[in-house]
Image (cartoon, helix red, strand yellow):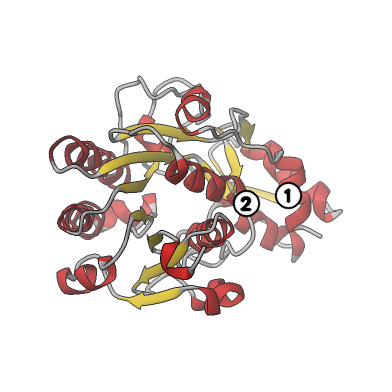
Amino acid sequence: MSGGARPLVLVTGGAGFIGSHACEALLTDGMRVRVFDDFSTGNAANLAGIWRDIEVAEGSVESPDALARAMAGVRDVVHLAARSSVAESIAAADVYRRVNIDGTRALLATAADAGVRRVVFAASSSAYGDHAAPHDESMEPRPMSPYAETKVAGEALVREFAESRGVDGVALRFFNVYGPRQDPNSAYAAVIARFRSRIAADLPITIYGDGLQTRDFIHVSDTARAIACALRATTPLAGTAVNIGTGRATSVLELASLIAHALGGSPVMTHAAAREGEVRDSVAVTERAAAMIGFRATTRIEDGLASMCR
């Protein structure tokens, strides 16, 4: 195909951890990719390997003019740009609502005006709150933090625009994503990146609560593939929420042991109080992803950790 015949996909937050992997997956799928990022948390270095193959538009979802320019000629949108720290959201709820809700509404409106076909929205497993695991999409959301509330609100906007503005959409509820390029020093860093960095340096790791809380850890390569699957789906997705996880629960204590084993060491642990707004158990029911977008995760956590710890 000629360059002009290949669909153009806009990836907001494309310089971030998940975003950069999504861009690679979309290029592999034969798409043209335009990254839209304000680089407040995203890093251009994440795109170094594909910089010559993509377009980059610097800007914020809070800027209508920047959004309109970035949307020109776009067939589909992958919307990853967001504030994403549970702890930070408690202290900065207004900022989270402005960026994650108002920014998503503005993006969807711009997409509708531009005739975009489909929006893939980065939702979150935090929508389930304190529901007993495993979590399936039929459960009523129970967000336990301002961050989770903004993600649930984003899902509702995706459904609304699919129903009333003709922009097909899907809300991918990401569970705990890990893998290369996850910054262990970031305020948004997930537990695997932090544990790996500290255990490798023979430093103690902090266990919040008793460490028996569980999470569904999904490798970023699987997450990126799920995004590509959502764009390839041939039937309308109608704003549906879809879990993106592995279906396997791993406790924080087990995780620490797995990382230490992959590094050839042993973890030194200190304990601290459980953190406000964090759920006890989180694990995905994955049948809807298989049925609607043809996706199943394939990377076992042991293999994903081993590749990170070589």
Give left or right: position of 280 versus 92: right
Residue topped by disc 2 = 192
**Which residue is found at the position 64% from the left and 60% from the top?**
180
Please, what secondary structure does the residue beneath circle 2 have? helix
Give left or right: position of 28 versus 134: right
Which residue is outermost to the front?
Answer: 1
**Which residue is found at the position 38% from the left and 56% from the top?**
80
Mark 1 crowd level (few <14, some 14–19, many ≥20, 10 Å Cα): many
Q: Are the two marked residues, 1 and 2, in contact with CB atoms closer than 8 angstroms?
A: yes
Measure how far apart labels 1 and 2 are at the Cα level. 9 Å
Q: Nearer the viewer, residue 208 or 213?
A: 213
Q: Dividing the picture into quarters, in which one does residue 102 lie?
A: bottom left
Please, what secondary structure does the residue beneath circle 1 have? helix
**Which residue is found at the position 59% from the left and 58% from the top?**
28
User: Which amino acid type is shown beneath numbered disc 1?
Assistant: Leu
x then y, percent, for residue 82: 33, 58
Q: Nearer the viewer, residue 70 or 92?
A: 70
Q: Is residue 297 above or below residue 119?
A: above
User: Which amino acid type is shown beneath numbered disc 2?
Assistant: Ile
Q: Is residue 264 above or below residue 137?
A: below
Residue topped by disc 1 = 305
Q: Is residue 120 above or below residue 138?
A: below
